[in-house]
C-alpha cells in the first residue's frame, strides 16, 4: 500500500483559489502522477484542493475529513477567536479518516493541505512541524507504514517551486 499526500497548488490568500502559478503547478503534477499506479483519489472539499485534483483528469471523491486542520496541532501559533474545541475536533476528524483509508490496502492519493499532511506524517514518526514549509504541489509518500518521501517537488520546473520553502530532511 502506498499513500501519496499531495498539497494543493499555490493559492491566493484572500480568495483561497489557485493562482495562475498554482494551476501550472497542478498541471505539471498531474502529468507526473499519471505515471504512477494510483487506485483511488480523495480530495479535501476546499476549493483549492478540488481545483488541484481536477487537473488529474480522473474521478475523485471529495471528503471533508481532509479539510485543513488547526495549526496548533502541528505546533503552529494559536489563532485568536478559534473555538476551544477546534483542536480536538480536528484531530478526531483526521484520525477517523486515517483509520478508514489505512484499511483499504490500495495505492491512494490524498489531495489536501499542509497541516493535515504534517499531522499524518507525524503519526508515522516524522517530527515535521508548522515552520517546515511544504511546497505547493509537493508530494509526500508513505509505503507500508513507512515514510518514503517528504516534500518531493522534482516533478516541478524550478520556476514553479516556492522560493520560501525550507529543505526538509
Image: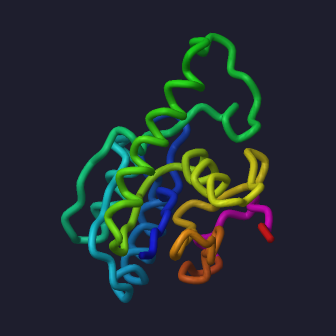
Image position of 77 (left or right of 9): right
Q: Quadrant of the N terminus?
A: bottom left
Tell me the residue at 39%/66% (across/down). Answer: 109
Instruction: Name the spot of residue 46 as percent of width and height, x first.
Output: 37, 41
The single residue placed furthest to the bottom in the displayed view is 35
**Which residue corresponds to the image point at 73% horizontal and 23% vertical from the top-left?**
78
In this picture the colour scheme is rainbow
Residue beneath the point at 70% across and 31% down: 72
**Residue 4 appears at what percent x and percent y?**
47, 69
50 is within the stretch colored magenta: no
Side (left or right) of 137 relative to 35: right
Q: Looking at this view, is 29 or 159 the one in front?
A: 29
Farthest residue toward the left?
59
Residue 105, given in percent of the width and then of the height, sits at 35, 70
| In this view, 96 is above or below 159 | above
Q: Quadrant of residue 102 in the image?
A: bottom left
> Residue 161 in magenta?
yes
In the image, which residues are magenta?
Answer: 159-167
User: What is the count of numbered marks?
Assistant: 0
Report x, y in % for residue 95.
Answer: 48, 42
Residue nearer the viewer, 20 or 132: 132
In the rendered view, would you say 52 is above or below 169? above
Q: Quadrant of the C terminus?
A: bottom right
Q: Which residue shows up at 65% across the image and 79% down it?
A: 158
| Predominant SS of the magenta segment | loop
| Location of residue 59 by image quarter | bottom left
Amino acid at each position: 500500500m502506498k499513500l501519496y499526500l499531495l498539497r494543493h497548488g499555490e493559492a491566493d490568500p484572500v480568495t483561497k483559489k489557485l493562482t495562475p502559478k498554482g494551476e501550472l503547478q497542478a498541471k505539471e503534477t498531474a502529468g507526473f502522477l499519471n505515471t504512477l499506479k494510483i487506485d483511488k483519489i480523495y480530495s479535501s472539499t476546499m476549493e483549492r484542493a478540488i481545483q488541484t485534483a481536477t487537473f488529474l483528469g480522473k474521478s475523485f471523491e471529495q471528503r471533508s475529513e481532509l479539510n485543513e486542520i488547526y495549526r496548533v496541532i502541528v505546533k503552529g501559533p494559536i489563532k485568536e477567536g478559534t473555538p476551544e474545541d477546534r483542536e480536538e475536533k480536528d484531530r478526531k476528524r483526521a484520525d477517523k479518516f486515517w483509520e478508514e483509508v489505512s484499511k483499504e490496502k490500495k495505492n491512494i492519493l490524498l489531495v489536501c493541505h499542509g497541516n493535515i499532511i504534517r499531522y499524518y506524517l507525524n503519526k508515522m514518526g516524522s517530527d515535521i512541524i508548522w515552520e517546515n514549509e511544504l511546497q505547493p504541489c509537493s508530494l509526500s509518500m508513505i509505503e507500508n507504514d513507512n515514510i518514503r518521501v517528504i516534500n518531493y517537488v522534482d516533478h516541478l520546473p524550478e520556476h514553479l517551486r516556492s522560493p520560501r520553502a525550507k529543505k526538509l530532511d
